[in-house]
Image: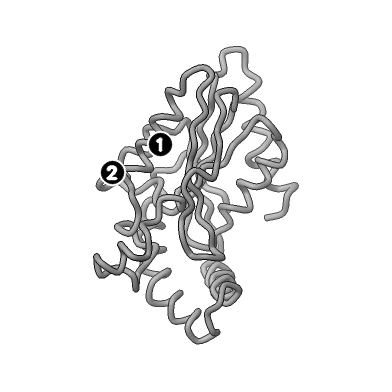
Amino acid sequence: MDSTQIQQLILDPILARLALPDAPHRYMLGLAGAPGAGKSTVAQVLLDALPGRAALVPMDGFHLANEELARLGRADRKGAQDTFDSAGYVALLQRLRRQRAGEVIYAPTFRRDIDAAEAGAIAVPEHIELIITEGNYLLLDEGHWANVRGLLDETWYIDIDPALRRERLVARHMRFGRSAEAALAWVLNTDEPNARLIDASMARADHVLR
């Protein structure tokens, strides 16, 4: 999907929603999909098109710390739904929904270069019109994740060819230090089981982008 297609499928409709006379003060858009589907790419196009009007708050900022994952025995499947602070993510979305005038809300991000979340990295001032949140489990209907969908105005599921998605993931893991063999093993043993669970939540999306 190139930037022109993204504009036609997502940007133009979102701009139309923001321009409505009765548009809410803040519109919250969720971008869901399996690892490697292109969620960050779509989010970045929206951010670039709406400077000063949009903010990206990624679900990945709520990864549990590597030390905590090791303590819990989950380090070898980092990225699964129980390796995130899902309750914290829901609480942040609730705060963004009812942000007070003059308040700045700080959100975490995830840094792939250090494989860890970074607290307070994203500042969201009160005037931001569009909150974009992207992540794997926005549509999951279990645990704290089940509360996410009701806090968003609209959710899009990004669905791409599985072979291309796996190819992207292997390249990403290699870019951040894994060997080709280790990257492929991680994709097949960790990312793919997560992808099957995430794909099963697709029916809860408002729209599917293919």
Q: Identify residue for label 2.
A: 144
**Label 1 crowd bin: few (<14), some (14–19), many (20+), radius 10 Å:** some
Colour setting: one colour
Q: Nearer the viewer, residue 4 or 65?
A: 65
What is the quadrant of residue 71 in the picture?
Answer: bottom left
Q: Measuring from the top left, give residue 39's x and y in whole percent.
A: 56, 52
What is the quadrant of residue 69 in the picture?
Answer: bottom left
Q: Measuring from the top left, give residue 50's x and y in whole percent.
A: 69, 34
Distance from disc 2 to disc 1, alpha carbons, whole Å, reads 12 Å
What's the mark number on residue 14? none
Mark 1 residue type:
Leu
In the picture, which quadrant includes the C terminus?
Answer: bottom right
What's the mark number on residue 92? 1
What is the quadrant of residue 165 in the picture?
Answer: bottom right
Which residue: 52% across, 56% down? Answer: 159
| Label 2 or label 1, whichever comes before in sequence order | 1
Which residue: 56% across, 41% down? Answer: 56
Mark 2 residue type:
His
Q: Nearer the viewer, residue 156 or 97?
A: 97
In the depicted structure, whether residue 60 falls above or below residue 87: below
In the picture, which quadrant includes the N terminus?
Answer: bottom right
**Label 2 crowd bin: few (<14), some (14–19), many (20+), radius 10 Å:** some
Left or right: residue 46 compared with residue 24: right
- Please, what secondary structure does the residue beneath circle 2 have? helix
Q: Measuring from the top left, give residue 128's x and y in whole percent.
A: 59, 27
| Label pair 2/1, CB-CB below 8 angstroms | no
Q: Nearer the viewer, residue 109 or 141?
A: 109
